[in-house]
């Protein structure tokens, strides 16, 4: 009877033992636990920067509309219809174009209209500790 040929010693050592696999997975888990919080923090920071930009663009459009027409717009859609905005931006924190909070002009204002300022409708606080509804 013929015996099967033996593999060279190197070929038998190519596989990993269970201990080596556990060590590799532990290193990967450690690196992921370090990277994940930094990643989520940078995503949150990017959303906040996008929110600030959207608020600045809409507030600038409201100011230009008011300067041109002598009154505040009645809605954000009016800014789009009149060409001051291409479209109402999406709130990066809520993911909706309809969650913006529109603030009316002050009671003692001589300028008529419906929207004097806009804020985010998102709940929570920014990384600076200020509520999103106060930005």
Image (cartoon, helix red, strand yellow):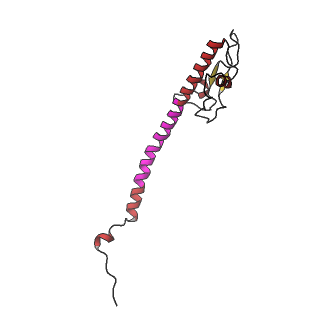
Rendered residue at 65%/22% (across/down): 79
Rendered residue at 53%/30% (across/down): 50
Per the image, is 86 magenta? no
> Overall secondary structure of the magenta stretch?
helix
Q: Position of residue 69 (x, y in %)?
A: 66, 13
The magenta-colored residue range is 26-49
Q: Quadrant of the C terminus?
A: top right
Q: Position of residue 27 (x, y in %)?
A: 40, 52
Given residues 116 and 12, the one toward you in this image is: 116
Q: Is residue 111 above or below residue 91?
A: above
Left or right side of 88 for 10: left
Per the image, is 45 magenta? yes
Note whether residue 50 is visible.
yes
Q: Is residue 100 above or below residue 32?
A: above
Q: Quadrant of the N terminus?
A: bottom left
Number of dots carrying numbers: 0
Q: Position of residue 26 (x, y in %)?
A: 42, 54
Left or right side of 87 for 128: left
Q: Is residue 79 above or below residue 13?
A: above
Left or right side of 49 for 20: left
Q: Residue furthest left?
A: 9
Given residues 20 and 52, the one toward you in this image is: 52
Rendered residue at 65%/18% (across/down): 116
Given residues 30 and 53, the one toward you in this image is: 53
Given residues 80 and 109, the one toward you in this image is: 80
Q: Position of residue 102 (x, y in %)?
A: 67, 23
Rendered residue at 56%/23% (across/down): 57
Which of the 4 image quadrants contains residue 60?
top right
């Amino acid at each position: 009877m013929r015996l099967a040929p033996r593999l060279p010693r190197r070929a038998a050592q190519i596989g990993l033992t269970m201990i080596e696999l556990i060590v590799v997975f532990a290193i990967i888990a450690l690196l992921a636990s370090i990277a994940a919080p930094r990643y989520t923090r940078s995503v949150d920071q990017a959303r906040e920067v996008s929110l600030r930009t959207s608020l600045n663009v809409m507030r600038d459009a409201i100011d230009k509309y008011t300067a041109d027409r002598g009154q505040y717009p009645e809605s954000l859609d009016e800014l789009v219809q009149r060409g001051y905005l291409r479209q109402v931006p999406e709130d990066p924190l809520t993911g909706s174009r309809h969650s913006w909070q529109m603030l009316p002009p002050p009671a003692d204002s001589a300028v008529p209209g419906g929207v004097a300022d806009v804020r985010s409708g998102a709940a929570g606080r920014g990384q600076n500790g200020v509520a999103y509804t106060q930005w």
